[in-house]
Amino acid sequence: MVDGDTLVTRMSGRELRVRLIGVDAPEIRHRGSTLPGECFGTDAAAALRRLAPRGGVLKVTPDRERRDPYGRELRYAWTSDGLFVNAALIRDGYARAMVVPPNDRFIGLFRAAESTAHQARSGLWSGCQGPARDVGRIKPANRSSRSPWVPRGVPGRPASNHSK
C-alpha cells in the first residue's frame, strides 16, 4: 500500500506499483516529506488497504495505456469476489473521479459514483475544503488534448491476477 490510489502488488514474483485508473484520492503525508497530507488522505489509504489487503488477490486490467510517466502500472482492479475497487473508492467518498485520456473506459460509472458520494456527503465530501482541493467539480475528458502518456497496449478483460 502506498496511498489511497496506488498500491504495490506481486505478479510472477515481481513487485509492481499499480496506480488505479480514474481514481484521485487525497494525498497522505509520506515519510520524510515536509508536505502535509490532504484532508481524508489517511482514510482513503485505509479504505484501499481494506479493499486490497496484504496477501489478497486482485484481478486487474489496463486501459489504453499500461504505464504512467512515473513507471507505475495503470490498472482497473477487482477483488476476488468481483467488487470493482476503483469505483468503490469513488462511490464511498474516498476519492474523486479523474479523467486522463485516453484511459476513460469507465468514466461514466466513475462520474455516477462520484455524484452519489457527493449527494450523500460521504467521505471527503463531508467537509474537506481548502485551496488544495476543489472537491465540487469533475473535469470532463478533453478529447482534443493529447495525453502526456504513451499508449502501450489494447485493454483486455480483467484476467491478470495480482497478489498483494
Image (cartoon, helix red, strand yellow):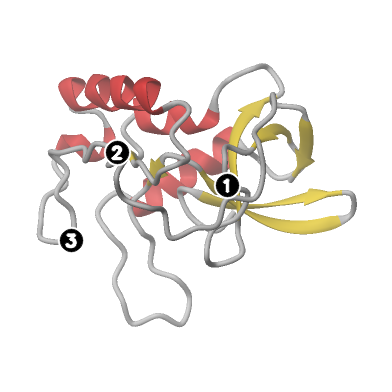
- Give x and y (percent) for residue 158: 70, 26
Residue that sits furthest to the right in the current view: 13
Q: Between marks 3 and 2, how big is the CA–CA gap?
A: 21 Å
Counting from the top left corner in percent of width and height, residue 81 is at: 68, 17
Is 90 situated left or right of 15 in this image? left
Q: Amino acid at mark 2?
A: Ala
Q: Secondary structure at mark 3?
A: loop
Q: Is residue 132 left or right of residue 89?
A: left
Q: Is residue 58 left or right of residue 1?
A: right
Residue 16: x, y in percent?
A: 72, 57
Q: Which mark is residue 49?
A: none
**Residue shown at 65%/33% (left/top)?**
155
Q: Which residue is mark 3?
A: 132
Q: Which residue is mark 1?
A: 65
Q: Residues within 10 Å of mark 2 (few under 14, many from 20)?
A: some
- The nearer-to-camera label among 3 and 2 is 2
Q: Residue at x 38, y 68 (%)?
A: 29
Q: Earlier in the sequence, mark 1 or mark 2?
A: 1
Q: Nearer the viewer, residue 136 or 61?
A: 61
Per the image, the residue denoted by label 2 is: 141
Pick whichever of labels 3 and 1 is earlier in the sequence.
1
